[in-house]
Amino acid sequence: MKTTTIHKTKWYLALVLLLGFACQPLPEEESESTSSGKMYSIEEAFEIVAAENDVARTLYTKAIVGEGKKNGLKFHEDWEKDEVEAGPLPALFLRGIASDIKKKGEIPLGLFLGSDFPVRKSNKFVGKQAELFSEIRQDGKPKYFYDEESKLYTAMFPDFAGAKPCVTCHNEHPETTKTDWKMGDIMGATTWTYPSDSVSFEELQGMIMAYRDGAAATFQKYLDKTETFSENETPKVGDVWPSAGYQLPSPTEFLDSVNHLSSKNTLKGILKM
């Protein structure tokens, strides 16, 4: 299986963040601490990576799955099985990113998508997360807490139904426990975990890049799968998108688009905090 390193996107993001951060004047009283770098609360860090996730998942859901289905591309929950010629559904794209981050083990960032009405029972919230998710359903706001059992700082962000393919898939799934989802509903929550209550700028940058590397790796895995197709044609891959036909962007093209859509707000978030 091929692997892809997104050098252009990685170094572009690093340069944008580092230059943007370095150009901000620091108050005189902070100057003595600059050698160790600015620190961010884990809540602030979670907000930044959660926003990155929103951009990447929305782009994948709308531009890849939504447009892809219109032009013959297929997506399935069992996409990794040899006999299934399809790509990952949006929730499984996120699961792939989470698995890649965990497998590489370079950054202790955890990622999980759960719900009170999941398609798979293993994704059902229990315990403290179930309690907090009931609050999210009421106020639609993120929840932050320290999990005494896992010894991890945790954040839960509401996962809204922002694309028609997600709503249709969940309503029509044979194992669904809820068939009346509609656009705008809170379908679940994206949960992030980290072992520290604060991170340095370098650690925050590492969290962002771990997420983006996971997205690139998962997308590459999908492209690798298309090369094994026998019943369906292998889609063209390059600087192309499904909206124009039976084709897919390269991981670099996909990540560059995520970068274009999110880096400005990511940088603003970093400098604001």
Image: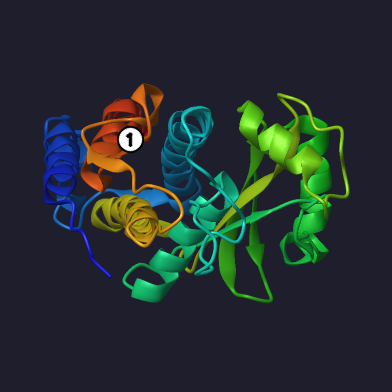
Residue at 46% over, 42% down: 53
Q: Locate the C terminus by quadrant.
A: top left
Which quadrant of the structure image shows residue 52?
A: top left
Percent of width and height locating residue 94: 51, 52
Picture layout, residue 235 above or below residue 66: below
Picture layout, residue 60 above or below residue 11: above
Give the crowd class for mark 1: few <14, some 14-19, many >=20 residues within 10 Å: many
**Closer to the camera in the image, 189 or 204:** 189
Q: Would you say 243 lies left or right of 188 here?
A: left
Residue at 50% over, 52% down: 86
Percent of width and height locating residue 135: 81, 42
> Residue furthest toward the front?
231
**Closer to the camera in the image, 131 or 272:** 131
Q: Would you say 121 lies left or right of 143 here?
A: right
Q: Which residue is mark 1?
A: 258
**Closer to the camera in the image, 29 or 244:** 244
Percent of width and height locating residue 140: 72, 32
Residue 210 appearing in the image: yes
Q: Would you say 130 lies left or right of 141 here?
A: right
Residue 141 appearing in the image: no
Residue at 14% over, 55% down: 35
* Disc 1 residue type (three-letter): Val
